[in-house]
Amino acid sequence: MEFIYEYGLFLAQAVTLVGAILVLVAGLVAVGQRNKAEQHEGHIEIRNLNEKYEQMRDQLEHVVTDPERLKAAHKEKKKEKKKAAKAAKAAKKSGKSGSEPAGQRKRLYVMGFDGDIKASASDKLREEISAVLNQVEEGDEVLVKVESPGGLVHGYGLAASQLQRVRDAGVPLTVAVDKVAASGGYMMACVADRILAAPFAVIGSIGVLAQLPNFHRLLKKNDIDFELFTAGEYKRTVTMFGENTDKGREKFTEELEKTHELFKDFVSSHRPQLDINKVATGEVWYGQQALSEGLVDELTTSDTFIQQRLKDWDVYDVRFVLKKNWQEKLGMAAEGALEKVFLKIWQRGQGRPPL
């Protein structure tokens, strides 16, 4: 009986806490809705990947290398740095004003695109590309790691246009696909000068689809009327609640075919070597097959591509980070609190002590 009493008391406290949190969250959502029109501020974060991997190498080296060899290697590094500094100083004195500084290394800017159905990451990609194009110099390159199964046509059309800005600026653009770039994801990838893919990355799906449920018979069975008023013969071709007609279906299919033709033309304009009618069937290929079909140019991963350039290039990871407002921060805190409450309730129900 004592356990039941304690459990009931805990449950009542939990329900009270959950209710309070829900009220708080509802208030925050209401405030957030009022400020929805305001765009969140963000900032660009740039990380030197040369330094990152050098630190990792040094940490591993300290563990696995004999101390004497490590000491000798450090001395050699110091000599090389002094030698490089003297060469740079001498070049500065001999000075060719206006010329490229001696020892100037090329730069690789790395960005990522993690796509959802709306291509929401386009907003971040836009800011990252704008920042890079303001600093890029001759010889620099851009690598974009694209991961997306596709989504809305207009969203991915805009994302592809952001990548086109790099090409239009005359900057070599490489797209790396480690997992998947299908449909809208491949629409983005094909803009690049070169496409890299992991051996089992999913590539292709050059096609268009649309699907929707229709509840007309269910509404009719329950004597519920649905009325849709439009102006324009094809303002609405198919609907979820009304009775769809053969004429409407035919028009809708025609619109899908037109969109598919636009997609094919877009891919062909960027990769004219493709047999577009062969690959634009909506099928997908793994990286090895995609290479044979001409959909990609090389089988490798983004990590391999980056590490190949670390020795002679300066490599920078560029990210646009949104600043979370106080409503979002409190919402995340509330979410965490709810998870803990439900975990404790479950543990009590299982007879387990809380963590």
Image: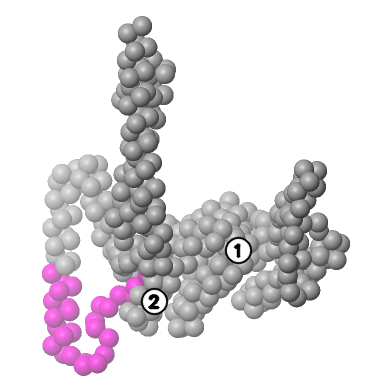
Residue 23 falls in image quadrant:
top left
Classify 35 as above or below 68.
below
Q: Secondary structure at mark 1?
A: loop
Tell me how many marks there are: 2
Q: Name the amino acid type tagged 1.
A: Leu
Give the mark, 1 or 2, whose residue is nearer the N terminus.
Answer: 2
Depth check: 148 or 78 in front? 148
Inter-mark Cα distance, 1 to 2: 23 Å
Q: Residue at x 67, y 60 (%)?
A: 205
Q: Is residue 294 magenta?
A: no
x and y percentages locating residue 308 in the rendered image: 40, 62
Query: In the image, which residues are magenta?
Result: 82-110
x and y percentages locating residue 56 in the rendered image: 27, 51
What residue is shown with label 1?
152
Q: Residue at x 32, y 15 (%)?
A: 6
**Residue lying furthest top:** 1
What residue is shown with label 2?
130
Left or right of residue 94: residue 141: right
Q: Quadrant of the C terminus?
A: top left
How crowded pointer 2 is (Cα within 10 Å; few <14, some 14-19, many 20+) is rated as some
x and y percentages locating residue 66 in the rendered image: 19, 43
x and y percentages locating residue 272 in the rendered image: 66, 77
Left or right of residue 315: residue 177: right
Residue 261 falls in image quadrant:
bottom right
Q: Residue at x 65, y 75 (%)?
A: 266
Q: Is residue 99 magenta?
A: yes
Left or right of residue 241: residue 102: left
